[in-house]
Amino acid sequence: GENVEQHPSTLSVQEGDSAVIKCTYSDSASNYFPWYKQELGKGPQLIIDIRSNVGEKKDQRIAVTLNKTAKHFSLHITETQPEDSAVYFCAASNPGSARQLTFGSGTQLTVLP
Amino acid sequence: DGGITQSPKYLFRKEGQNVTLSCEQNLNHDAMYWYRQDPGQGLRLIYYSQIVNDFQKGDIAEGYSVSREKKESFPLTVTSAQKNPTAFYLCATTPRTSGVHNEQFFGPGTRLTVL
């Protein structure tokens, strides 16, 4: 089955700096890669996603890149703000799998004012 | 959130007792999922259901049971066989079980504490 590894597990940046979180996946058939943000005590919320026919996608301060050959994808947050502090999860999906998403272990991002 | 309701938000249980966590959705989504979240371990899949009256075990199904009698509801029972049930439990849904769009929508979660 699919295996998703996520790094780093914790990340601290100064307000205004950029943050990068990286994930690798094992199943070459996976074709959908979402990123979720989870605030303390709440359920995860989708912030951006990318499909395998696209190499990069951007939404304001957030961008995701995908390298299908190397089987890794990354989340980039620019001009970080304190409200970006949260746990971020990557995931991968193989459309042939009934269980849908396989999640990474999460990254605790702290933006220091 | 946004059409997925989990209740209660906090739940306390004595050792040896079964407890049922509720998950209800009004999104008309086909598939529903239960995840367990422990600190530093991400989301682990317990059970999932693609259609009514059908469900499959995930990675950590031991000590848990589910039912899917209605499309809108997917309750999770934590039995006394679950050795370490204290965790944050998340319910999720997906619009369809196959095709291009695989986004999962999450409920607000239930925090279960065993006393």
Image (spheres, coloured by chain):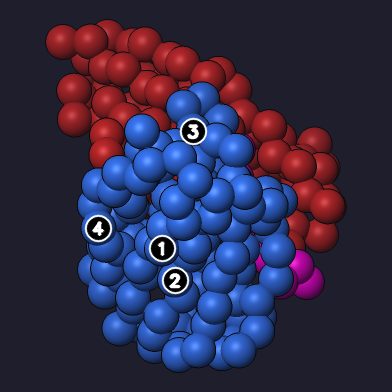
Residue on which the image places disc 3: B38
Residue that numbered label 1 is attached to: B20
Q: Earlier in the sequence, mark 4 or mark 1?
A: 4
At horizontal 33% and vertical 75% (from top left) the residue drawn is B24
Q: Quadrant of the C terminus of chain A?
A: top left
The Cα atoms of the two marked residues, 4 and 2, are separated by: 12 Å
Q: What is the crowding at mark 4: few (fewer than 14 residues within 10 Å), some, or many (at least 20)?
A: some
- Secondary structure under tag 3 reads loop
Mark 4 chain? B
**In the rendered image of this protein, which colour is used for chain B?**
blue
Give above or below for A91 relative to B96: above
Q: Earlier in the sequence, mark 4 or mark 3?
A: 4
- Respond whether the residues carrying marks 4 and 1 are from the same subunit: yes
Q: CA distance from mark 3 to mark 2?
A: 20 Å
Q: Quadrant of residue B96?
A: bottom right
State how far apart marks 2 and 1 are (Cα).
7 Å
Question: Against A43, is A61 above or below?
Answer: above
The amino acid pointed to by label 2 is Pro
* Both marks 2 and 1 on one chain: yes
Part of the protein shown in magenta: A96-104
Quadrant assignment, res B70: bottom left
Q: Earlier in the sequence, mark 4 or mark 2?
A: 4
Query: The numbered mark 3 sits on a residue in which chain?
Result: B
Q: Secondary structure at mark 4?
A: loop
Amino acid type, residue under disc 3 in the picture: Asp
Residue located 26% across and 74% down the image = B3
Q: Which mark is residue B8?
A: 4
Between label 4 and label 1, give the one nearer the viewer: 1
Q: Nearer the viewer, residue B18 or A97?
A: B18
Are both tags, 3 and 2, on one chain?
yes
Q: Position of residue A102 (x, y in %)?
A: 65, 51
Identify which residue, B17 or B85, lies in the foreground: B17
